[in-house]
Image (cartoon, rainbow, N blue to C red):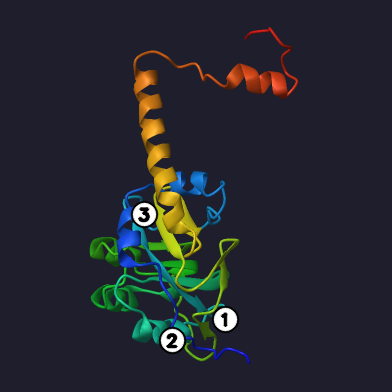
Amino acid sequence: MSLPNIVKSFERVPADVVARAAKFQPAVLADVAGRRGALHGRIRALRPDMKLAGPAFTVEVRPGDNLMIHAALALAQPGDVLVIDGKGDQTSALMGAIMMNAARQRGLAGVVMDGAVRDSLELEALGFPVFSVGTNPNGPTKEVGGRLGHPVSVGGVTIRAGDYICGDADGLVAVEREKIESLLALAAHKAEAEARRIAQIREGNTNAPWLLASLVTAGVLKDGEVL
C-alpha cells in the first residue's frame, strides 16, 4: 500500500535526546557519525549566530511553490524543524517574514530549506533560526501539490521525518533517528579530546602526534625519516 501524500504521524527523536545532542556542535556529531550526514555548504545560516536542533518535519515542494509549506505549518509540532526540499531553486523565495513568524509562534525550532527566503532583515530581527541557499525578493506560487512526512533529499543528504537535524555557523548535520542517541557518548569523548588538544597547543605543543606515521603510510616519508 502506498503512503498518502501527507503523513501526519511519525516517530520523532525524543525531546530529551534532542536536548542532550544539542550540546554538541554539528561538526562533532558529523565526525563521530563517520564524517557523513553533513548537508551541502550551499545551505547555511541566514546569520552566523543562528543555531537549531530538533526532529525533522520533512516537506517536498515543486520549485517556486510553497503550498505544502503552509500545510506543514498547520501540522508541525513544537520543537520540530521544517526541512524543505525546494530543489535548490533560487528564482523565488519559499518563505518570508509572515510564515517565519507563524513558525516561531507555533514553537518550531527552525527552518532548513534547499531554496531561497526573503525579508532577511526582518528575519534577523526575529531571531528565528533559518538556513537556506540564499535570498530572493520574488514571491512563490501556492498552487502545486507535494508531500509531507516523506523522505527528502536536502543538500545531498537523505532525511526522513523524525530524524535529528542540527545547525550552526558551520552548516547542518542530519543523523538518523535510531542512531543519534548512540553517538552521544562518542560525541562527549570527542569534545573532551579536542578541548585537551587545544589546551596542549596553547601550551606550545603544536606538533600533531599522528603526522609522521601518516606520512610514512602515505609514502611521503620512509621509516625513520623526520620532517
| Residue where numbered disc 3 is placed | 21
Q: Which residue is at the front of the view, 82 or 224?
A: 224
Asked where in the image residue 189 lies, by quadrant, the reply is: top left
Question: Can you give x and y, in whole percent of width and height, for residue 24 in the image?
Answer: 36, 48
In the rendered image, which residue does mark 2 sit on? Answer: 8
- Image point (38%, 19%), residue name: 200
Look at the numbered disc 3 and give the secondary structure of its residue.
helix
Which quadrant is the C terminus positioned in? top right
Q: Nearer the viewer, residue 73 or 183?
A: 183
Gap between marks 1 and 3, in whole Å?
A: 32 Å
Q: Kindly report which numbered mark, 1 or 3, lies closer to the viewer in this rendering.
A: 3
Local crowd at mark 2 within 10 Å, few (<14), some, or many (≥20)?
few
First reached walking from the N terminus: tag 1 or tag 3: 3
> Residue drawn at (27%, 78%), measured in percent from left and top?
106
- Amino acid type at circle 1 is Arg
| Residue 8 visible in rendering | yes
Q: Amino acid at mark 2?
A: Lys
Q: CA distance from mark 1 to mark 2?
A: 20 Å
Q: Amino acid at mark 3?
A: Ala
Where disc 2 sits, the SS reads loop
Residue 9 horizontal side relative to residue 151, left or right: left
Q: Are marks 3 and 2 in contact (CB under 8 Å)?
A: no
Q: Is residue 183 above or below residue 165?
A: above
The answer to whether 144 is drawn above or below residue 34 in the figure is below
